[in-house]
Image (cartoon, helix red, strand yellow):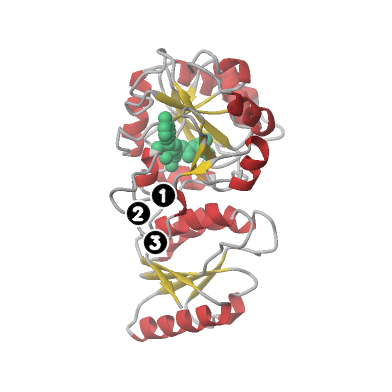
């Protein structure tokens, strides 16, 4: 489906499926989502089961206009209003105290509800046209990288859902920024397109859940405030290591490891960028794009992690991307993919 010129009859069918309690995968401006009726506990249960997702990991409720918000939340704090005005529709999820009509199945048993108003034209037309609140986690099997292209959704969910709406690449390629506005001080629970700095510019003070910035595996006392952030995520089958340090030392270390592994007959991959890819002569060299082009690295993270499995690589070495655009969000996903296996050189 062409996001700028699509046939609404397919969306009418999709809307009917949602109203009937079925599941529809659809594109958004972040990643593809797997939608079901958020106010129908049976539909939420179907989502958990199609994804193989633990049912204590709550779903995000997607709306098609701001006026739909009031019915599902208890209150809309001032800071939320400011964020909504600047960032909605768009890649920002807000956590509110939930109203009684939102079933506990949708919120993983919590008294709060995550709400997002996506800007993707197909997502928007689907949600509005269906007339339902659409619970939608990322449309991947639990534990796999989030899907940024229709092929990824088909790979993971074909035969497990009622309909998949394909529309090329999701734009940003990383999931939405999540800000909890249900407590006294707003808190970032998941980094994304809207950075800590941009949120601060809009509302002033904001906390960041320490789990988000953890460079090593968070210990048991550091409990993630977004339940989903505690699960092993995005992990490729090969053993992944992130190598941190000065550019040439990183390349030297990785080249040594590639040599060593290849002499043992292993297939090894390197995750790098356009600026550094010529530093690597052997192994499967995968560039995420240019560090200088805004959003390019972020847009290729999940697709590249999926390709690691397709290529059957046994070891993966990734550079650090802290300094590039959306670096915090990119490194949060890569560190999780590597199970926090980081080497400093
Ligand atoms: O960009 C996105 O947000 C995508 C697209 C499809 O909209 N959706 C997405 O959903 O990433 P999912 O289910 O993959 O991630 C939702 C995250 C999980 O980490 C979950 O634990 C957290 O949001 N979450 C949902 N409701 C919450 C709540 N009430 N309190 C805290 N965290 C919550
Ligand atoms: Mg997900």
Residue 34 on image: x %, y %: 46, 33
Give the camera-side residue of 179 and 124: 179
Are dots 1 and 2 in contact, CB under 8 Å? yes
- Disc 1 marks which residue? 211
Which mark is in front, 1 or 3?
1
Quarter of the image for residue 110 reads: top left
Which of the four quarters of the rendered structure image does ligand 1 lie in? top left
Q: Earlier in the sequence, mark 2 or mark 3?
A: 2
Q: Earlier in the sequence, mark 1 or mark 3?
A: 1
Label 3 environment density (alpha carbons within 10 Å; few <14, some 14–19, many ≥20)? many
Label 1 environment density (alpha carbons within 10 Å; few <14, some 14–19, many ≥20)? many
Report the residue at 58% width, 36% height from top.
92
- Disc 2 marks which residue? 218
Q: Earlier in the sequence, mark 1 or mark 2?
A: 1
Q: CA distance from mark 2 to mark 3?
A: 13 Å
Which mark is in front, 2 or 3?
2
Report the residue at 61% width, 15% height from top.
67
Mark 2 CB lies closer than 8 A to ligand 1: no
Quarter of the image for residue 306 reads: bottom left
Residue 191 on image: x %, y %: 52, 46
Mark 3 CB lies closer than 8 A to ligand 2: no
| Residue 32 in view here | no
- Disc 3 marks which residue? 338
Residue 135 on image: x %, y %: 45, 27
Q: Is residue 2 above or below residue 247?
A: above
Left or right of 297: which side holds 132?
left
Please, what secondary structure does the residue beneath circle 3 have? loop
For the N terminus, the image quarter is top right
Report the residue at 57% width, 42% height from top.
30
Please, what secondary structure does the residue beneath circle 2 have? loop
């Amino acid at each position: 489906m062409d996001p700028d010129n699509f046939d609404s009859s397919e969306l009418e069918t999709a809307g009917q499926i949602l109203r009937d309690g079925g599941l529809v995968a659809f594109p958004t401006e972040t990643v593809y989502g797997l939608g079901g009726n958020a106010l129908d506990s049976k539909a939420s249960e179907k989502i958990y089961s199609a994804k193989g997702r633990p049912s204590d990991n709550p779903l995000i409720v997607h709306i098609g206009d701001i006026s739909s918000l009031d019915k599902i939340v208890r209150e809309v704090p001032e800071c939320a209003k400011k964020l909504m005005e600047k960032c909605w529709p768009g890649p920002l999820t807000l956590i509110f105290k939930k109203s009684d009509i939102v079933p506990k199945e949708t919120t993983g048993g919590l008294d709060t509800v995550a709400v997002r108003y996506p800007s993707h034209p197909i997502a928007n037309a689907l949600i509005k046209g269906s007339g339902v609140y659409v619970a939608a986690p990322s449309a991947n099997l639990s534990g796999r990288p989030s899907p940024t292209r229709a092929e990824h959704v088909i790979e993971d969910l074909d035969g497990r859902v009622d309909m998949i709406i394909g529309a090329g690449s999701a734009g940003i390629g990383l999931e939405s920024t999540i800000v909890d506005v249900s407590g006294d001080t707003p808190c970032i629970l998941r980094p994304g397109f809207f950075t800590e700095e941009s949120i601060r510019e809009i509302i002033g003070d904001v906390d960041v859940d320490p789990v988000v910035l953890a460079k090593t595996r968070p210990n048991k006392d550091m409990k993630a405030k977004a339940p989903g952030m505690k699960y092993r995520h995005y992990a490729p089958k090969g053993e992944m290591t992130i190598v941190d340090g000065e550019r040439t030392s990183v390349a030297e270390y990785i080249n040594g490891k590639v040599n060593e592994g290849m002499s043992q007959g292993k297939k090894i991959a390197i995750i790098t960028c356009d600026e550094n890819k010529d530093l690597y002569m052997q192994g499967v060299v995968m560039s995420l794009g240019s560090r200088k082009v805004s959003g390019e690295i972020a847009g290729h993270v999940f697709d590249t992690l999926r390709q690691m499995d397709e290529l059957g690589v046994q070891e993966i070495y990734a550079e650090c991307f802290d300094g590039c655009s959306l670096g915090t969000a990119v490194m949060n996903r890569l560190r999780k993919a590597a199970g926090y296996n980081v080497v400093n050189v």
